[in-house]
Image: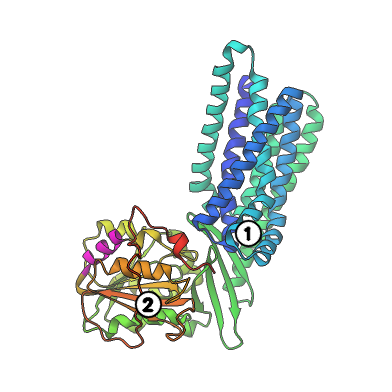
Amino acid sequence: MKKYRLEIVLFIVDAIYMILELIASRLLSPYFGNSNLVWTSIIGIILLSNSIGNFIGGKIADKDCSRKNLKLILKVAGIVVFIIPFIQEFILTGTSLMISSIKVGAILSAILLFFIPSMLFGFFSPIIIKLKMNDLENVGTTSGRIYAIATLGSLTGTFFGGFVLLPAIGSNQLLFILSAILFLLILLIGETNIKKDLIFVIIAVTLSCASFYIFNYLNNFQGIQVLNKSYSAMVSYDTQYGRVCIYNTNDGENSYRTLLVGKGHESATFIDEKKCNDLVYEYTKYYDLMFESSKDIKNTLMIGGAGYSYPKYYISNYLDKSIDVVEIDEDITEIAKKYFYLDKLIEDYDLDNNQRLGLIAEDGRTYLNKNDKKYDAILNDAFAGETPAQTLTTIEAAQKIHNSLTENGLYLSNIISSIDGKNSNFIKAEVNTLKQVFKNVYVVPCRDNNNFELVQNNMVIATDDTLFLENTVELNIPSDTIILTDNYCPVDSLIPSI
């Protein structure tokens, strides 16, 4: 092991480097969302900083290539990573308030929080290559081995961090663990000043562990406060698919509990248990438009559960009907049970036994791809933050939806857009796409059907039946409006820039 300790250090450092990139997306998402723009900003800045680190690391390797320098870099990197949880809210709040552009705000935030640690991680490969270099004849073999080890470390960090660590440990708490690991790696490098290094590492690791405990305790305490209905209480979790925040608030008349996924307000419930199955958001009431058709709706599919606000309303108000809910994130469903009264609904209406509510943990599109069940109505409220689920907007998805409906069944989709103007590109493209599959497509604004440039929730209803609905509007769809396909679906550039 002593012979390969530098390779072990490099492997672990590059694993941490990739975990840091995953954490960056979680920290930025409540402020800037988790769209392609944000991911591009994060990846771009981290790659840039790492490449600068490689360049500077090469200079250091040529000038003073020593294990002492590696220890110093590990110390600085550990300290910088340790500091991030304490400064991230201040930086992210400031940049999101001062900068209206999501792209610019995400880039600046990524620079302020992650440029330095990513650059420091870039120092390691060139320095370790130089330290491991024995003769010029083996330069290719040595450098190839080092880069292979670094890549395997990055791969391990990506899979282990994304699949295991982030869902199990909060982003801030994980940063403390990573800082402690960086400090411990100082001892693995060894050689001079062992006693001095040991004292530093003991102090630094102790601080990291203490901070982990404090942040973890505070998060658990905040969860209890939210459940105790305390005003302004907030708790956050990292799930397999993103960062989730739950908070309590009130408007002077009613108290609400809101579910925030990324930057998007996904669901809300009245905190009063007597009203917990009522609908808070006005637009969700428009899903009831399906009952204004001539079709007798008995079984419904809803894609996107989040806080299960409409399914709770549906189950409690239509006692002869059933609904299946497809939610990609199992942790979100557990959060809905704990914080949004879904467990109470299941108990009150004996849903474990009568099968009126089906809970399906799967991606909406993959469920539709293999589904052979027929539904009278399909409802789509699937969003990634404020961005609609791209795979459900295409003509191929529309065909799968059509195939999953009974004759003259209805498809209802919530689309945030204006009816006309610069913020109407997505709804026009989506309606144009649906018209290729369904005989009729109707658009009902959920707030104001007179102000066509107002960005609002709109209920888009597609069916082969002829409906007579109030407050429908006709979209002015240009002849060159695109049809969204699995091959080309530029949702990020079409949705309103708000």
Q: Nearer the viewer, mark 1 or mark 2?
A: 1
In percent of width and height, residue 457 lies at 44, 76
- Residue 404 is a magenta residue: yes
Crowd band around label 1 with a 10 angstrom C-alpha radius: few (<14), some (14–19), many (20+): many
Q: Is residue 97 above or below residue 255?
A: above
The reply, left or right, for residue 217 in relation to residue 277 is: right
Helix, strand or loop under label 1: helix
Q: Is residue 327 above or below residue 115?
A: below
Crowd band around label 2 with a 10 angstrom C-alpha radius: few (<14), some (14–19), many (20+): many
Three-letter amino acid code at the position of disc 2: Met
Which residue corresponds to the image point at 44% horizontal and 64% vertical from the top-left?
494
Which residue corresponds to the image point at 33% horizontal and 70% vertical from the top-left?
431
Foreground of the two, 351 or 385 = 385
The extreme left residue here reads: 407
- Disc 1 target residue: 105
In percent of width and height, residue 427 lies at 39, 70
Helix, strand or loop under label 2: strand
Which residue corresponds to the image point at 56% horizontal and 53% vertical from the top-left?
25
Three-letter amino acid code at the position of disc 1: Gly
The quarter of the image holding the N terminus is: top right
Which quarter of the figure has residue 293? bottom left
Whether residue 357 appears in this view of the structure is: no
The reply, left or right, for residue 400 in relation to residue 387 is: left
- Residue 490 is a magenta residue: no
Foreground of the two, 94 or 405 = 94
Which quarter of the figure has residue 182? top right
The extreme front residue here reads: 479
Label located before the other in sequence (1 or 2): 1
Which range of residues does the magenta coloring cover?
Answer: 395-405
- Disc 2 target residue: 459
Foreground of the two, 114 or 394 = 394
